[in-house]
Amino acid sequence: MTLFTPRAIAMPAEGAAMLADAVKRIAQPSRRAFLQRSLTLGGLSLLTGCSTSDQDSIEQALAGVSRWNDRVQGLLFDPARLAPTYPASMITRPFPFNAFYGEEQVREVDGDAWRLELSGMVAERKPWTLARLRALPQQDQITRHICVEGWSAIGKWGGVSFGHFLRHVGADLSAKYVGFHCADDYFTSIDMATALHPQTLMALTYDDQPLPPRYGFPMKLRMPTKLGYKNPKHVQAIVVTNTHPGGYWENQGYNWFGGS
């Protein structure tokens, strides 16, 4: 994961240690772990004007660093640069399960009844069936999934180019954001440049087989340019919008851009 922080400001070692200790006191464990990995001394130095006993001021400073990271990552993102691809011999077997719940709680979706709903700045809003998506041109990729928890795995995903799909339904490509709502109550959003990236995929298969429920049946968005939490599973609604849609983890303090 590459996160960008402002230029570090020199401070005594005692001050840096005190600020680091303040960050450790943030209440949400998952958010705390993420921020500890994503903030360098340069990011922590923004807290020098805060009281380390004032959690609200610490939260505000951390949110400012995250917004700064989003802007810089957005500016540096190259929509033509491809993530690495790998031979089939390097596929991780079994590919790990990851979600904000345990594997025993995986959502079972009826593929025959499933409909993909479209809204927002889209010309064609007719719901899509799984069969209709499968009739579009398909492609596959063997790419690395990078999790914010520190692990990674290589998998083979197949499906429809998301950029092709957006053009097919007449999405306004000048819109800022694309948001996703999922059958497991997860939600997230991405920038339009990432949506149009040639490797951003509406994944319908895994390892040449129909997408298993544990990996997001009937459709997940696969983006090798994003960290794992930006890759939603069981997608059932897409919105194209200029209003920032946020996300499940992003609303709890995770970096919104989430580039890998």
Image (spheres, helix red, strand yellow):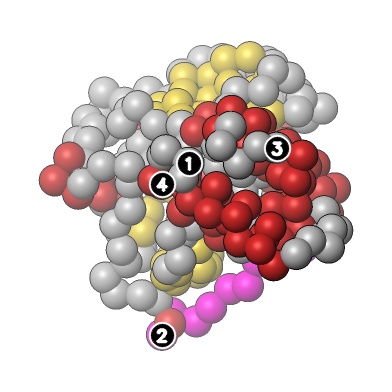
Q: Depth-wise, is mark 2 or mark 4 nearer the camera? A: 4
Report the residue marked by disc 1: 26
Is disc 2 in contact with disc 4, using a CB cutoff of under 8 Å? no
The quadrant in which residue 190 appears is top right
Measure the C-alpha gap from mark 3 to mark 1: 14 Å
Q: Depth-wise, is mark 3 or mark 2 nearer the camera? A: 3
Q: Which residue is at a point 32% across and 66% down the rendered structure image?
A: 95
For marks 3 and 2, the one nearer the N-term is: 3
For marks 3 and 1, the one nearer the N-term is: 1
| Nearer-the-camera pick, 132 or 229 | 229
Measure the C-alpha gap from mark 2 to mark 4: 33 Å
Mark 3 burial class by Cα count in 10 Å: few <14, some 14-19, many 20+: some
Measure the C-alpha gap from mark 3 to mark 2: 51 Å
Q: Which residue is at a point 17% across and 40% down the rendered structure image?
A: 105
In the image, residue 252 lies at what x, y percent? 49, 33
For marks 1 and 2, the one nearer the N-term is: 1
The quadrant in which residue 169 appears is top right
Q: What residue type is labelled 3?
A: Cys
Report the residue marked by disc 2: 89
| Nearer-the-camera pick, 115 or 5 | 5
Report the residue marked by disc 3: 50
In the image, residue 53 lies at what x, y percent? 56, 37
Q: What residue type is labelled 4?
A: Ser
Measure the C-alpha gap from mark 1 to mark 4: 10 Å
Mark 4 burial class by Cα count in 10 Å: few <14, some 14-19, many 20+: some
Q: Which residue is at a point 22% across and 30% down the rendered structure image?
A: 110
Measure the C-alpha gap from mark 1 to mark 2: 42 Å
> What is the span of residues highlighted in magenta in the rendered image?
79-89
Report the residue marked by disc 4: 30
In the image, residue 208 lies at what x, y percent? 36, 63
Mark 2 burial class by Cα count in 10 Å: few <14, some 14-19, many 20+: few
Q: What residue type is labelled 1?
A: Ile
